Amino acid sequence: MSDVKKNCIDHSLEKRIWSNMRQSRQTDVLMVEMAGITYPDKNYAIRRTRNTKRVYDNLYVIEYVVSGVGYIESEGLRASVGAGDLYIIHRRTVHSYYADKQQPFCKKWLNVSGRFMNAMEEAFLDEAPFTVVRLGESAEKIIDSIHGLLEGAKEDSESLRGEVMRQLLELFLMIDSHKRALRTEMSPYEQICEYIEQNICNDLNVSVIASKFFISPSTLYRLFMSNAGVSPKEYIVGRKISLAKRMIGANDSTFNDIAASLGFYDSHHFFKTFRSVTGQSPTEYRKSLLEEEKQE
């Protein structure tokens, strides 16, 4: 995980719709702690650790990306998010999320806690530190509706919480329906690509992937050559280097950290692979990005 040392928010680029001054309690059914809109800011970064126990134990972050690109990192996993994506960062996770330097995201968000959310996580979400689904305008409408409820409320109330819960349940049912549809509609090739994306930070083994999907390595090879024009190994390396380029451009992570987070053996292996794919070393690539920023 990159070391985002502190929260970086330019509050002139944020609209705060709701802020609940009361601290959440374990007995709460639902509490909307904060809600708002974050506008594009290349320096935007949030990091949460176990140090703030109340936040760590209880908080769920629900965000819909309107435009641009952002990144989520938690417990060795990393994902990029873009327009149309809804992501939920689960409670009890050390995590960071931040904007892409070149295309900072704009997003609408809710910070929520309570026993209702715990139940939704158990019923509809996987055992992972965060969930990302591309739901598009359907999800945005629900977030907008909840924002409208909060903007129109004078104070926190049982009726407000009840209506927010109804809207959130609709959102979670939408997530569940989307995930089930994906499992049935995706081709074997798409399912394997999805598996690679979910495990891109690990040392992916072609033989292990083939056995997981009950096919031979030679069948896996033919599948990728016919769909992507490259071998499975080349595809995996390409995806790792693509993510590495974004990480180099998006934050100040060391090359050792990037190599480790993407499952390379060491920094030497990372440098060698990066140069073979891009024709540049990671150092040269970072320098070229800095020069481009100066020219803008």
Image (spheres, rainbow, N blue to C red):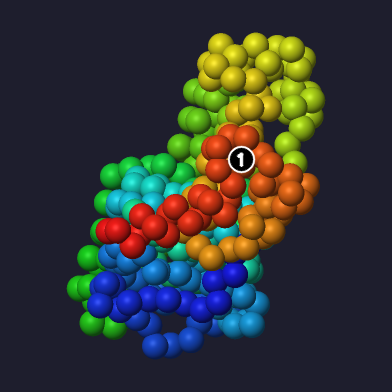
Dividing the picture into quadrants, the one containing residue 211 is top right
Dividing the picture into quadrants, the one containing residue 269 is top right
Instruction: Name above or below for residue 208 compared with residue 172.
Output: above
User: Residue, x 67% and y 60% (percent of image)?
Assistant: 257
Q: Position of residue 172 (x, y in %)?
A: 46, 50
Amino acid type shown at disc 1: Arg
Q: Position of residue 189 (x, y in %)?
A: 58, 21
Dividing the picture into quadrants, the one containing residue 111 is bottom left
Locate the C terminus and report the quarter of the image it occupies: bottom left
User: Residue, x 30% and y 51% (percent of image)?
Assistant: 67
Q: Secondary structure at mark 1?
A: helix
Locate the N terminus and report the quarter of the image it occupies: bottom right
Would residue 173 be found to the left or right of residue 155 on screen? right
| Residue 234 visible from this viewpoint | yes
The number of numbered discs placed on residues in the rendered structure image is: 1
User: Residue, x 58% and y 50% (percent of image)?
Assistant: 282
* Residue under label 1: 275
**Toward the viewer: 125 or 249?**
249
Q: Residues within 10 Å of mark 1 (few under 14, many from 20)?
A: some
Q: Position of residue 154 (x, y in %)?
A: 23, 82
| Residue 140 visible from this viewpoint | no
